DNA sequence: CGGAACCGACCGATCGGTCGGTCTGTTTTT
DNA sequence: AAAAACAGACCGACCGATCGGTCGGTTCCG
């Protein structure tokens, strides 16, 4: 009796998104066929295509949903946190937090964007670029206010790589693992970007 | 007249390895079918299967060849460089150098190991683990001799992620890009691992 | 001649996707 | 209130295309 509209209508769609992300993260997008996907989710082929127009559509939605989430959080940080050093820390801890809560989906974002058809891919890459631009602007702002070392594209990529790679080894079920990762990364952030 | 055995016999095989790595790096292993691969290399299906027993065999050989190369270099560093700080720098610069010279192959190693059949995958993962163990032992040695900060698995993964991610943005045609990447990473290595 | 290199038509399996149809629950008409 | 009309959720047999892989045959060279 606990509702029909809010409990079941979007629930099945979200269930597919989540289950597909788990499968794709573990075995790769192209390696998981529709038969396997539907079987794992106890879904008929028809039921799947009732919710999504194509396999690519499903992948795009996973990527778009989480890249949008990341970008949204970054924009919020930019709007709310004027201090570059604090904002950088916030960008990092939010990224780790999303990876901790949705590792599979982020794995798909980071690893399977390449599997999207050209036009769909461009849209996701644009979101990704916008996200990284906020990191970049933060480093440049910090340089201008004198708290950060001069900006370098190489240093930015080094920091991003450190965060991005974590989806491959972090344990999302351990809050202490996530916390320690964040603490370690924060200290590296400071050691690398703060002026001596 | 410049030889037949050394110039042509392994040459075509190597040409396939190299061309396939380029294609797989750009579009993903499962996305490139045998028809496309053979067409791009101006090869008949039959000619390909004269050199490799299967598509998986080709992928495994790319991964094995370069993970072995990486591991070999790391073992050499370990044997030849007793000082942990210098050895760490050497491990890093060798990794960047290999990525600079064989970006596509390393991209396949890092991104497509997941596409291998289970048994083949295990072998590659073992090589990868052995490689990372040398980094780990170097950090631990440095801690024991007092030059490095106490060992932390999170810090190790942070450093490796920084290096691994570089295949996605580095420009292998620019020697100055490779040099600057290496310089930047070296300074981060020092800032993060050296005792204050 | 023997054998490595190579060719390309062909194979069964599987791919992503479609489509006619069923079932259930709600809304409208009488 | 009963009947008719409708709409969304879901089913699974089926489609053409393409997948990775095979094989009998040909070419070429030592």
Image (cartoon, coloured by chain):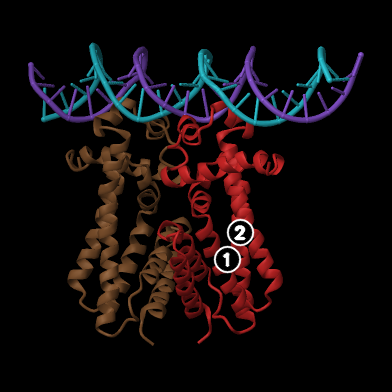
Chain colours: A red, B brown, C purple, D cyan
Along the line of sight, the residue nearer the viewer: A150 or D28: A150
Q: In this view, does A3 lie above or below A151?
A: above
In this rendering, position of residue A34 left or right of residue B140:
right
Q: Name the residue under label 1.
A: A94
* Residue closer to the observer: C6 or A4: A4
Subunit of label 1: A
User: Residue A85: x, y in percent?
Assistant: 59, 78
Location of mark 2 (residue): A70
- Whether residues under marks 1 and 2 lie with C-beta atoms below 8 angstroms apart, the answer is yes
- Residue C23, image x and y in percent? 64, 20
Question: In the image, are marks 1 and 2 on the same chain?
Answer: yes
Label 1 to label 2, Cα distance in Å?
8 Å
Q: Position of residue B41 (x, y in %)?
A: 37, 35
Give above or below for A158 relative to B20: below
Q: Residue at x 68, y 77 (%)?
A: A82
The percent position of residue A175, horizontal first and vertical second, equals: 47, 65
Q: How crowded is mark 2: few (under 14 residues within 10 Å), some or many (20 or more)?
A: many
Secondary element under disc 1, as helix, strand or loop, is helix
Quadrant in the picture for residue B144: bottom left
Residue drawn at 54 percent across, 28 percent down: A44
Q: Is residue B96 above or below residue B43?
A: below
Q: Residue at x 22, y 40 (%)?
A: B10
Which corner quadrant holds the N terminus of chain A? Answer: top right
């Amino acid at each position: 009796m606990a509702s029909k509209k809010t409990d079941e209508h979007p629930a099945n769609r979200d269930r597919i998104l989540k289950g597909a992300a788990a499968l794709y993260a573990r075995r790769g997008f192209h390696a998981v066929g529709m038969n396997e996907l539907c079987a794992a989710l106890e879904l008929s082929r028809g039921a799947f295509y009732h919710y999504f127009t194509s396999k690519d559509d499903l992948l795009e939605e996973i990527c778009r949903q989480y890249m949008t989430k990341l970008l949204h959080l970054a924009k919020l940080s930019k709007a709310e946190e004027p201090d570059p050093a604090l904002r950088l820390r916030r960008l990092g801890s939010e990224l780790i937090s999303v990876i901790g809560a949705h590792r599979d989906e982020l794995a798909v974002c980071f690893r399977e964007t390449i599997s999207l058809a050209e036009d769909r891919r461009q849209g996701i890459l644009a979101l990704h670029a916008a996200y990284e631009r906020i990191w970049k602007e933060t480093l440049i702002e910090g340089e201008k206010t004198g708290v950060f070392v001069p900006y370098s594209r190489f240093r930015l990529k080094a920091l991003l790589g450190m965060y991005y790679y974590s989806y491959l080894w972090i344990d999302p079920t351990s809050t202490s693992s996530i916390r320690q990762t964040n603490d370690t990364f924060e200290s590296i952030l400071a050691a690398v970007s703060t002026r001596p």
